[in-house]
Image (cartoon, rainbow, N blue to C red):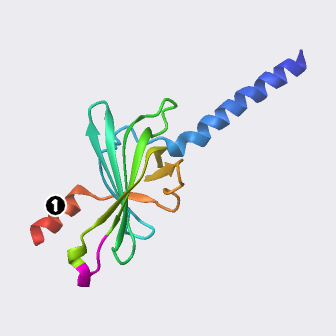
């Protein structure tokens, strides 16, 4: 009998610990996914999330430093069944090779890389992360929301 009591107490504690471990992944109650985010690591990648029907249209643009190549990812995500972020299937990846300034007449070369990507957008401690299951393209990015007021004041100042 004592063993059963100890076992049930341990199980309860494990469940409590699991819930506590997930707290950083839980957005604040007033958190809205919609918005524009920039990668705080390299400050090049941009994530845009827009409300689209029952889901969210997500677009991620990742240019190289010289802006000669842009990797673009697009997918419609829905709230994950486990309540942790947004998940998607049928994500597309398109590569854009931009011509050099000397060869502008060559135009942009577009390559459709894939259209069967899967993954998730999730919240962690005030930032948004992208977990791309197809080719791990989301690793290394930490997205921070671009504040609407800052964007509006920059536009007004131009």
Q: Indicate left or right for 112 with 150 as reference.
A: right
Q: Is residue 100 magenta?
A: yes
Q: Nearer the viewer, residue 100 or 131?
A: 100
Q: Nearer the viewer, residue 50 or 94?
A: 94
Q: Indicate left or right for 33 with 127 as reference.
A: left
The magenta segment = 98-103
Q: Indicate left or right for 22 with 62 as reference.
A: right
At x 38%, y 58%, the residue is 144
At x 71%, y 31%, the residue is 13
Give the class, few, some or many, for how many residues have Cα within 10 Å of label 1's Cα (few <14, many ≥20): few
Name of the residue lying farthest toward the front: 106
Tell me where residue 110 appears, x and y as whole percent: 32, 61
Instruction: Give the secondary structure at mark 1.
Output: helix
Q: Is residue 119 magenta?
A: no
Q: Is residue 11 above or below residue 122?
A: above
Q: Is residue 66 above or below residue 127?
A: below
Which residue in the protein does label 1 denote?
Answer: 152
Tell me where residue 139 appears, x and y as whole percent: 53, 58
Name of the residue lying farthest toward the bottom: 102
Instruction: State the quadrant of the C terminus.
Output: bottom left
Residue 76, located in which quarter of the rendered image?
Answer: top left
Tell me where residue 154 appears, x and y as whole percent: 17, 68
């Amino acid at each position: 009998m004592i063993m059963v009591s100890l076992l049930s107490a341990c199980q309860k504690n494990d469940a409590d610990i699991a819930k506590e471990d997930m707290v950083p992944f839980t957005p604040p109650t007033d958190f809205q996914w919609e918005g524009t985010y920039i990668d705080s690591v390299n400050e090049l990648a941009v994530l845009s999330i827009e409300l689209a029907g029952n889901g969210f249209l997500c677009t991620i643009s990742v240019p190289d430093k010289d802006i000669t190549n842009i990797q673009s990812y697009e997918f419609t995500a829905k709230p994950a069944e486990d309540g942790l972020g947004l998940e998607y299937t049928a994500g597309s990846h398109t590569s854009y090779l931009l011509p050099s300034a000397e060869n502008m007449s060559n135009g942009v070369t577009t390559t459709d890389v894939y259209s069967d990507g899967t993954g998730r957008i999730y919240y962690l401690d005030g930032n948004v992360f992208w977990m791309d299951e197809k080719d791990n393209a989301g690793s290394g990015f930490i997205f921070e929301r671009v504040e609407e007021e800052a964007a509006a004041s920059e536009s007004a100042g131009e």
